[in-house]
Image: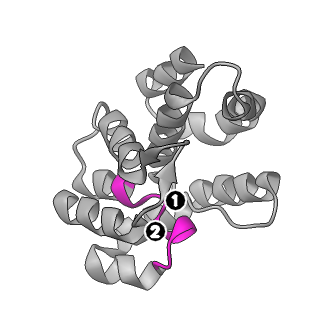
Amino acid sequence: MQDRARSFAVIAHGDQIYGEDQPYERHLAAVVEVIRDWTDDAELISAAWLHDTLEDTPTRFDDLAEQFSDRVARLVWAVTAEGDVRAEKMDAIYRKIAACPDAALVKLADRVANVEAAPAGSNHSRRYVGEREAFEQAIRSFVPADAWDRLDRAY
């Protein structure tokens, strides 16, 4: 399942770029590498590969449910931003994670990968630091302490 999720995500993201010049697969692989530190759950790892497909590609929820499982689709949906501005998007994610707590580990792995990749002082780095308190309130209670510690170290 994890290999199919990787292939599906890479194809879905096509020629999208992460950062200034990295193929998007680099970000997806980083998220998967992080989540594997805390779980071997195939559906969580598959959701890590697929975590941006609903948000950044034409992929639909039903596509994920049909290709993988309803749980994988729900995990990806829970970490998918909805809204027009960043605050609305993050609030939607936090609300959905409260309804699907397993997705918190996927979102945490995504945030760890993003914070570790963001150059200190960059716009992205400042954004993540600015969101730190709200992110902690929404996510921390759903994830293992050692996983949270990695995010603290990344900041």
Q: Quadrant of residue 56?
A: bottom right
Vertical comparison of 21 with 96: above or below: above
Camera-nearest label, 1 or 2: 2
Point 53% across, 36% down: residue: 114
User: Regarding mark 1 in the picture, which secondary structure is present there?
Assistant: loop
Check disc 1 and report the residue beneath it: 100
Residue 57 screen position, x and y as percent: 50, 72
Between the C-alphas of marks 1 and 2, the distance is 8 Å
User: CB atoms at circles 1 and 2 under 8 Å apart?
Assistant: yes
Check disc 2 and report the residue beneath it: 74
Label located before the other in sequence (1 or 2): 2
Q: Nearer the viewer, residue 79 or 49?
A: 49
Residue 24 screen position, x and y as percent: 42, 52
Badge 1 density bin: few <14, some 14–19, many ≥20, Cα 10 Å: some
Q: Quadrant of residue 71?
A: bottom left
Apparent side of residue 7 relative to residue 126 in the rendered image (left or right): left
Q: Residue furthest front?
A: 21
Apparent side of residue 59 relative to residue 122 in the rendered image (left or right): left
Tell me the magenta residue range.
Answer: 48-59
Vertical comparison of 116 with 44: above or below: above
Apparent side of residue 13 relative to residue 83 in the rendered image (left or right): left
Task: Name the amino acid type tagged 1.
Answer: Cys
Point 32% across, 62% down: residue: 10
